[in-house]
Amino acid sequence: MEKHSPLKTILIVSAIFYLIFIIGTSFDIKGERYFTLVDDAMISMRYARNLAQGHGLVWNIGEPPVEGFTNLGWTLYLAFLHFFPFPASKISLAVMLTSLVILLANIHTISKIAEALQPNSKYAPTLAAIVTVFYFPLVFWSLRGMEVGLLTWLISLAILFSLTEKRPVFIGILFAAAILVRVDAIVSIAPIALYLLLKNKRNAIIPIAIAAIALLTVFYFQKIYFGDFLPATYYQKMTGFTALERIRHGLLVFVEFATRDTLPLFLFSLAGIFFYKFQRSREALLLLGIFLAQCAYSIYVGGDYAEPETNAANRFITQGMPALIVLFSWMTNRILTDLKTAQPQSTFAAPKLNPAIPLAVIVLLIISGEPWFTQTIDNAPLLKADIRRVKLGLFLAETTSPEAVIAVHAAGQIPYYSQRTTIDLLGLNDPVVAKGEGHGEFYPGHNKWDYNYSIIHLRPDLIADNFAPLADFMIRTVQYAKLENGIYVRLDSNLINLKEISKDYR
C-alpha cells in the first residue's frame, strides 16, 4: 500500500488554513459580503481597472500616465482579472485565491529545494514546508493582495532549477518574470546569478543575459510610457532624505520587528555551518546570501511603513525568509540524523512522530506566534482601517457627482471604490509631490506633502481622510469646512450632496 505523502497532507492543511484566513477578512456592507486588499494593493487595482477598461495604465482617467506602483507585472495580472465580470465586492477575492494557489506552489517548491539539498532526508523537506506554510508575514502580505507571494515563488523556483543545473533558459525566464513583477527582484537574483557563475559559467550566461534584457526592457518601457525610468514611488520614498537617515530608520525597525523572525534561524544556521565543515558549500552560501541581501536591501531603503501594525519583519525581508528557512532545515536535518544514529535501535520500537513536526511548531511559536495570536484576537493587521476606507469610498460614490475630485492620503480603497478623480496628497501618484522635499523624521511613504499645491492650487471638491499635518494647514484654509464625520468639503463646490455627505458612513 502506497505511503501517504507528508507534503500532500501539508498542502491540504495549508489550503484550508488559508481559506479560513481569507474568509475571516471579509466583511458585510448593507447585506453584501465584501473582500478587499491592503491599501497599497488597491492602488495597483485602480491602475489595473483603468487599463482593463481601455483607459491605459493611468491613475486618473484622461490624465497623463504616472507610475504610482512598483509592481508592474502584478498590476498587469490584476488588469487581467478585471476583464472578468467580478463585482467590486468580489474582485479582491479573486486576487486572494490567486495568492493562495501561489503560496501552495511555493510550499511545494521549498520542499523540493530541501530534497535537492538533502536527498532521502526524512526531516528537512517537512520542516521547511511547515515553517513556510505558517510564517506570518508571507501569509499576510500574500493573501492581503501584495505581490510578495508571487515574487517569493519565482525566486524559489530559480533556486531549485539552479541547484539542479537544468534548463538555463527557464532560469532566465524566471529571472525576467521576477524583474517584471518588481524591478528590485534583482536583489535576490544577484546571489543566484553569482552562484551560477561560480558553479558553471557556461550555464550562467543565458540566465544573466535574459535578466539583463528584462531589466533594460522594463526601464525602457517606463521611460517611454510614463516619461521616467523610475516610478513616482521611488522618488517619494527614496529622495528628500539622506541615505544615512534611511539606513538609520531601517536598522531601527529591523532590530525592533525583524530580529525575532530572523535571528533564531540565522544563528542556528551559522552554528550548523561552523560545526559541520562538510556543510560549508556554495549552496549554503547561496541561501544565506539571498536572505542577507534582502535584509540589507530593507535596511538601505529604510524599512517599510507597516512593521508596527504587523509586528513582524517587513515584506522585503519576508521574500528572503524561505531561503533562510531551507538553510535552517538543512542544518537541523544534519543534527536530527546524528541524534537518531546515536540512539540504540529497538526491534519492537513503535512508529514515532516525525521530530520535524514538533520542531516546526516550536520554531513557529518563536518567530510567528505573537502576530498569529494577535490575528486570532483582533483579525488581520490594517483590516479595520481597510474596511473603513472601503465604506468611505462607497459613501463618496453615493454622495458626490462623477465629476467630483477628491483628495486622499490613503490612496487605495477610497479612490478604487469611489471611482472619482483623485489627488494623492502624499505623492505616491503625483510626481510633483513625490519629487518635493521631505518633512519631519524619515518614515517610508509618509514624508512628502505639499498642501499649497495639492489643495489650494488643485482645489479638490473634498478631502476624504485625515493625516496629522493636515489639521494645522486646514485651520488657515477658509475655502473648506470640516464635517463631523471628518471629511473636508470645499464650500463653493456644487458636485457634493452636502446633506447626505454629512452623515456618518461608518
Image: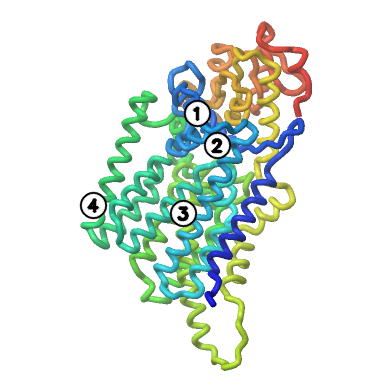
User: Could you give the CA–CA distance between mark 3 and mark 1, rounded to whole angstroms?
Assistant: 28 Å
From the image, tell me which residue sits under label 4: 205
- What element does badge 3 sit on? loop
Say which quadrant the N terminus sits in.
bottom right
- What element does badge 4 sit on? helix
- What element does badge 2 sit on? helix
Q: In this view, does 312 lie above or below 217?
A: below
Residue 261 location, x and y as percent? Answer: 56, 57
From the image, tell me which residue sits under label 2: 41
Nearer the N terminus, badge 2 or badge 4? 2
Q: What residue type is labelled 1?
A: Tyr
Q: Residue at the far front: name it.
A: 1
Residue 505 location, x and y as percent? Answer: 75, 26
Nearer the N terminus, badge 3 or badge 1? 1
| Residue appearing at x 58%, y 31% in the figure | 412
User: Could you give the CA–CA distance between mark 3 and mark 4, rounded to whole angstroms?
Assistant: 24 Å
Q: Residue at the far left: name it.
A: 202
Name the mark nearer the viewer: 3 or 1: 1
User: Could you give the CA–CA distance between mark 2 and mark 3, rounded to whole angstroms?
Assistant: 20 Å
Image quadrant in which you'd find residue 287: bottom left
Residue 493 visible in the shown view:
yes
From the image, tell me which residue sits under label 1: 47
Q: Nearer the viewer, residue 119 or 141?
A: 119
